[in-house]
Image (spheres, coloured by chain):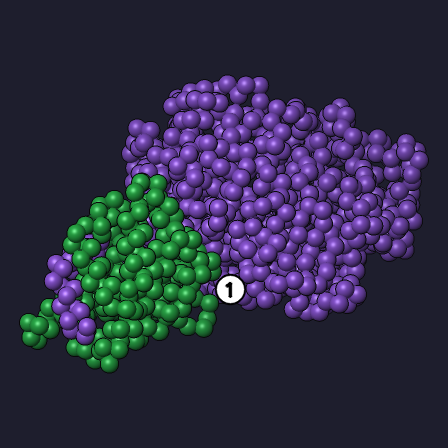
Chain colours: A green, B purple
Amino acid sequence: MSNSNIEMNNARNSVYQLLSSLFAKELNRAMLEELNGDNAQAFWAQLATQPEFEHYVKTIVDTLANLNTDDDLLELAADYCGLFLVGNKHSASPYASLYIGDKEPTIFGPQHQQMLTFLQEKQLQLHSDFSEPADHIAVILAYAGHLSLSADETHQLSYLKMNLANWLSNFVAQVKKTDQGVFYTAVAKLTLAWVNSEIEWLS
Amino acid sequence: MNRRDFLKGLLSTSYVVLSGTSVLAPLNALAKAGAKDKDGWLTTGSHFGAFKIKRKNGVIDQVKPFDTDKYPTDMINGIRGLVYNPSRVRYPMVRLDFLLKGHKSDTSKRGDFRFVRVTWDKALGLFKDSLDQIQTNYGPSALHAGQTGWRATGQLHSSTSHMQRAVGMHGNYVKKIGDYSTGAGQTILPYVLGSTEVYAQGTSWPLILENSDTIILWANDPYKNLQVGWNAETHEAYGYLAQLKEKVKAGKIRVISIDPVATKTQNYLGCENIYTNPQTDVPLMLAIAHELYTNDLYDKDFVKGYSLGFDRFVPYLMGTDDGIEKTPKWAEKITGVSESVIKELAKTMIGGRTQILMGWCIQRQQHGEQPYWMAAVLATMLGQIGLPGGGISYGHHYSSIGVPSSGAAAPGGFPRNLDEGKKPLFDNDDFKGASKVIPVARWIDAILEPGKTIDANGSKVTYPDIKMMVFSGNNPWNHHQDRNRMKQAFQKLECVVTVDINWTATCRFSDIVLPACTTLERNDIDIYGSYANRGLLAMQKMVEPLFESLSDFEIFTRFAALLGREKEYTRGMTETDWLKKLYDDCKAANEGKFAMPEFEQFWRDGYVHFGEGKTWTRHADFRKDPEINPLGTPSGLIEIFSRKIDRYNYDDCKGHPTWMEKLERSHGGPGSDKFPIWMQSCHPDKRLHSQMCESQEFRETYTVKGREPVYLNPSDAKERGIKDGDIVRVFNDRGQLLAGAVVSNNFPRGVIRIEEGAWYGPVGEDGSVEGGAKVGAICSYGDPNTLTQDIGSSKLAQACSAYTCLVNYEKFQGKIPNVSSFNGPMEVTT
């Protein structure tokens, strides 16, 4: 792989990891400072140069800039909790297995097993601080980032299609429907736009 | 800009990723210790029976019944759905407004508010701070940690014991007396027969099968209810029911089900039914007694030798004291049972060996003490108490009662109380004149009317001013009555803490919610077959606790550590140490009688069998010699008239069994002009109370368009334009719910059934989940306690009235809202 390709893939990995991080847990003060820092601002600005990302990035950046107090962070944490940490019908549980298959799903279903297999093949596992099923969207995105550095394009494309693109739009619609704020809807839509752009590019 | 340039631009920003947020790690570097897949099947148990499990990659893959269980319930098909439920409480959570404002939070939206995830340290710290505030500001009368219930099985991790021991280390608190299942029965029967009877071993099924000529199932549906047990259920009773079915078929035993509905048992056995109007069992029993008495058919010797107060009862029976003779003709009008059927029934009962088997439901109503007392009087008049296959039982539908017991000693459990000599941190016993113990079902009354004094079982109870409730493994938003009244009460509470596995309605109406793991995520031991005590079952951990849930032992050990009392709490022992101790103590108690291997061998085998039991007859010793073996009543005899109760001078529970009209009664009774339908809410067929309702795949085997079934009489349904599968609105002045119509000939006119345990899922008038917190919201799933009366059975027991109320119903015409029961908290747009 050329240096140029390595750089590009590092950049792609950065986007995947960033999106994964935003889904993985609530924002805390340290994360907020990083996301509002100069480096991140440049990153956001560069992301926003793409028209399909621009609107969502602006919403994200604006929200982040206005999270001034701890109470603001708690309100955002309550949005996160309502969306991703409880229930399934009136929230947007972030697990692939709840969106795939026609039988009423349970968590730790086949997609969880599938992701565990993928991780093991790459000598990876879930971080011990992350007590979630392996088909959590944060894991699927992080693994996509990992593949962007380590797998050929056909493999990457197949992975995205088989494990993310097949449920992501339903998930994003559910986030939009149940989000009490705007931040996570923007993050979800940015994710969908990003994955679509990736699939288009890899194709 | 092309993508290549765009990506290069991204990289040039030097932004990599948020530090410390990676969800992936190198394999094995951070490997969690825990259960690994093993070849073969592991053993465990539950209220639904014992079963075996096979795992795949650390996930429960297959579940099958335990080898010895010949009659497993299909509820074990719901086990996976309980564990891997999307509604799991995944992390410790705190209602946002409570986190921000503590005890001054806005409680008007409790039940539908915003939660945030917190760490265990934070959650337990808030829990302790709340207890500190309550004890400091109000004292122990403001804390109620005594609402406890069916928990999950297991002797070590029993949620009630852990919560009460830990909270008890912090301070004193209000407790309950009685339970929702048998509140009226367990209070009246000690006066009459000297024990609760409802929780006593009964005459063995083989003796009943051998000796009974007639079995009366009085409001009793054992074929439905024996699927579950207090401990891991063996289901051996089903073998005896199968034999009974054969005997019924062969005409060797006559079984008569006295019930307004055709029960599951009746349909299974193919037995007879005597229909009686709902809630009119006492008039029917009185009329049978009248027939026995006036025709001189009753056993005078037994009445004289073994009972007290018949002479005080007869004037009431004959109407010389109230002007109403309790004749079959009189009863016919009330009960709907014809005079001739009553007379024939009386002759049948006295004409041979008759075993009366009472169910529990009919004592969960206003005056619920009376049918139990009157049934005991009937059994006394028949004179067969203490004979095999005769007399009366109040428990043959429950937890292996009647299955011959092995007689082995059962293991103990984790201690519920403080160790001897130990004092709570807040060593304050000043309840400010309020009662320390209140009848179990009167806690909502207490919250709404603090300081009020009521009569209860010969004493006065003064309601404490409750400000905080703690629940663990308990879902009162299922088992208590009148949801809209509960909402008003909960708005008065400053803090509610709930420990549970899935987001019950109780969790949703709480401020602090703590995730407990399921029985499959920790090690424990259990008795196999509660009253049969058939053996000892290893409950082997199948998977690590999901998310950040913890075992009850771990949760409250951490809480005790906050009090500086961790070592005292655990007595310095780990989970494994405790399991071994409980086992070894049990082994020592059985030494020389029942062989038990060393603990390690037991754990490998998964089971110790104590052998088959010997048959036994209830009250045989009393019958043999009532002076040497007296009953536990004041006189030592069966008390047909209780001087003690008579002296209480209660207008709703007199000195002998009495028929009293109800506040609400169908079929021409009070209130039936306005709400003509009787709603029966008995124990469910497909759940254990509310346990298992959340298991979706299994739930879908019985729901109708995703709703709890409401069973309807065909003619009643037709009159309302309702057909099978329609969504029905059931309502009265207290509330309203939606349920799915199942039209069935099992249900007579004027009667519907919605089984209790259906999870509460309120939604607003527009179908919105945010409207569900409001008083008057409709239940989207079909929780019958949205409609029931929150009244005490009487001044004696003050027990719940969960079984019965008046309603009406119609085909639902509006936009059908989504079911909101099986989720976490909803969010409110403020």
Residue at (23% x, 77% y) in the render: A201
Query: Which residue corresponds to the image point at 43% horizontal and 42% vertical from the top-left?
Result: B95
x and y percentages locating residue B610 in the rendered image: 45, 51
Q: Residues within 10 Å of mark 1 (few under 14, many from 20)?
A: many
Disc tally is 1
In the figure, is residue B573 to the left or right of B152? left
Residue, disc 1: B698
Horizontal arrangement in the rendering, residue B228 relative to residue B724 (left or right) = left
- What quarter of the picture does the N terminus of chain B occupy? bottom left
Residue B220 relative to residue B593: left or right? right
Q: Residue at x 43, y 39 (%)?
A: B97
Camera-side residue of B79 and B534: B79
Quarter assignment of residue A48: bottom left
Residue B402 is situated, as x and y percent measured from the top left of the image, at: 60, 50
Would residue A81 be found to the left or right of residue B728 on screen? left
In this rendered view, identify the residue nearer to me: A61 or B213.
A61
